Amino acid sequence: MAKFCTNCGSKLNEDEDVCLNCGKKVKKNKSDNTNVSTEQNNPYVLTGFILGLISMFCINLFGVVGLLALIFSSIGLSKINKTNQPGRWMAITGIVLGVIGLVVGIYLTLS
Ligand SMILES: [Zn+2]
């Protein structure tokens, strides 16, 4: 749904709360984001997820990157479970990627 400035009537983007045309503050239609902090992704999860991707597609270092991805994602997931933060799927994906990266790394090292 498009929003319009209450002052000058110019069209606004959904996530803007200040009119770019006249500079007037616009009231948000959505309920206020009082829980902004919970919307941020857990840094452990993000790190684990990225490491998991790196271990899949770039560098594996004998499975070490996969192991790190597994560790970071596990820490992130335990924190998510305590605080009910979003990003559980990302943590689980990071763990899965980490396990695969670890197994592939060990396999490549031993073969
Ligand atoms: Zn305006």
Image (cartoon, helix red, strand yellow):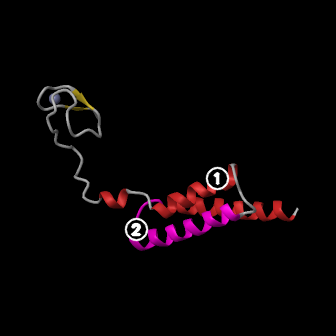
Q: State which quadrant residue 105 falls in.
A: bottom right
Q: Is residue 50 above or below residue 13?
A: below
Q: Give 64 or 57, whichever is nearer the viewer.
A: 64
Q: Which residue is mark 2?
A: 84
Q: Looking at the magenta stretch, what is its main secondary structure?
A: helix
Identified at 37% across, 57% down, the residue is 39
Q: Quadrant of the C terminus?
A: bottom right
Q: Position of residue 64 (x, y in %)?
A: 69, 64
Q: Dot 2 lies on which element?
A: loop
Q: Quadrant of the N terminus?
A: top left
Residue at the left extreme of this rendering: 7
The reply to whether the magenta stretch includes residue 68 is yes
Magenta residues? 64-87
Asked whether the beta carbons under mark 1 and mark 2 sit within 8 Å of each other, the answer is: no
Identified at 71% across, 57% down, the residue is 60
Task: Give the left or right position of residue 31, taking residue 106 as reference.
Answer: left
Identified at 20% across, 37% down, the residue is 18
Q: Is residue 92 above or below residue 8?
A: below
Q: Dot 1 lies on which element?
A: helix
Ligand 1 appears in which quadrant? Answer: top left
Identified at 42% across, 74% down, the residue is 82
Q: At label 1, which amino acid type do we have? A: Ile
Q: Which residue is mark 1?
A: 54
Q: At label 2, which amino acid type do we have? A: Asn
Residue 89 in view here:
no
Q: Position of residue 54 (x, y in %)?
A: 64, 53
Residue 79 in view here:
yes
Q: CA distance from mark 1 to mark 2?
A: 27 Å
Task: Give the left or right position of residue 97, taking residue 81 as reference.
Answer: right
Q: Earlier in the sequence, mark 1 or mark 2?
A: 1
Question: Is the CB–ligand 1 distance for label 1 below 8 Å?
Answer: no
